[in-house]
Amino acid sequence: MKFKKQIVVAIFISLVLTSCNFKLKAGIIKDESKNESVEEVIKKVDENIKKADEIIEQEKLSEEEKNELAVKVKNEVEDLVALLSETTDEIEIKELLKQEFDNSNEDIENIYFATEKGMFYLYPEQKLPEGFNPTNRSWYTQAKEKSEFTSSFTNSATGGEVLTLSLSVKSEENFIGVLGVDINLENNVQ
């Protein structure tokens, strides 16, 4: 679901709850002799919240759609994986990530490469926590073990749903590192 829709739904729910709370405090809804009892109003609010949750859930991508998107992005970055397997030059790695990001669709939030030696290259560049070790992250360890890994999560900065695709990078049969791509799923909801 688009971020704007989430905001509208959240504002709507907030207004309904605030309105009911205000009415209760003001004594407008006092007893059962009125048109609606407090219980009936609360029941309607609960029903509206449930409907809003159902709308939000319908707007999310299914697992099949996430897998299709992961395959599409994997196909788009295959050449990058091959190029990363052939270089250890830090400047070249950064430039390759930037080029892939710039040439990709707007759905890619981040693209990154982590080496077995713990080097981490991220585009767009962001400040990472001190002591950040990419080789301990599940996206890294799972891709190293299985060659490919996907996982979805909620981005704490934007609140949007993100799909991570991680691909093992090898030179011949030697493991070099993992390429990761974070894909914004909100832009892919129909």
Image (cartoon, grey):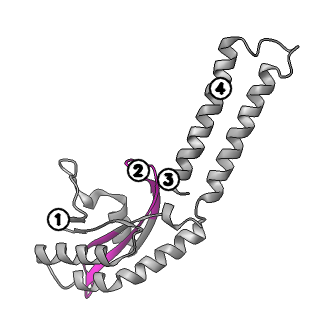
Q: Tell whether position 67 is magenta.
A: no
In the displayed structure image, the side of residue 183 where residue 111 appears, left or right = left
Q: Which residue is mark 1?
A: 119
Q: Would residue 171 be found to the left or right of residue 12 on screen? A: left
Q: Is mark 3 in CB contact (under 8 Å) with mark 2?
A: yes
Marks 4 and 2, how far apart at CA:
28 Å
Residue 33, position as x, y percentages in the image: 88, 13
The CA span between labels 4 and 3 is 24 Å
Q: Residues within 10 Å of mark 2 (few under 14, many from 20)?
A: few
Quarter occupied by residue 12: top right
First along the sequence among labels 1 and 3: 3
Residue located beneath label 2 in the image? 158
Residue 74 location (% of width, % of height): 41, 79
For the residue pair 167 and 154, the one nearer the viewer reads as 154
What's drawn in magenta, residue-wise? 151-180
Q: What's the distance in space between the residues labelled 1 and 2, CA to CA?
A: 26 Å
Q: Secondary structure at mark 4?
A: helix
Identity of the amino acid at label 1? Met
Which residue is denoted by mark 4 in the rendering? Answer: 19
Q: Is residue 66 visible?
A: yes
For the residues labelled 4 and 1, say whether their Cβ atoms are less than 8 Å apart.
no
Amino acid type of the residue that numbered disc 4 sits on in the rendered structure: Ser
Q: Disc 2 residue type?
A: Thr
Discs 4/1, front: 4
Judged from the image, the secondary structure of the residue bearing numbered disc 2 is: loop
Q: Residue at x 59, y 71 (%)?
A: 64
Q: Is residue 175 magenta?
A: yes
Residue visible at 36% across and 68% down?
Answer: 181
Tell me if label 1 and label 3 are in contact, CB under 8 Å. no
Left or right, 58 with reference to 99: right
In this figure, which residue is indicated by the disc labeled 3? 3
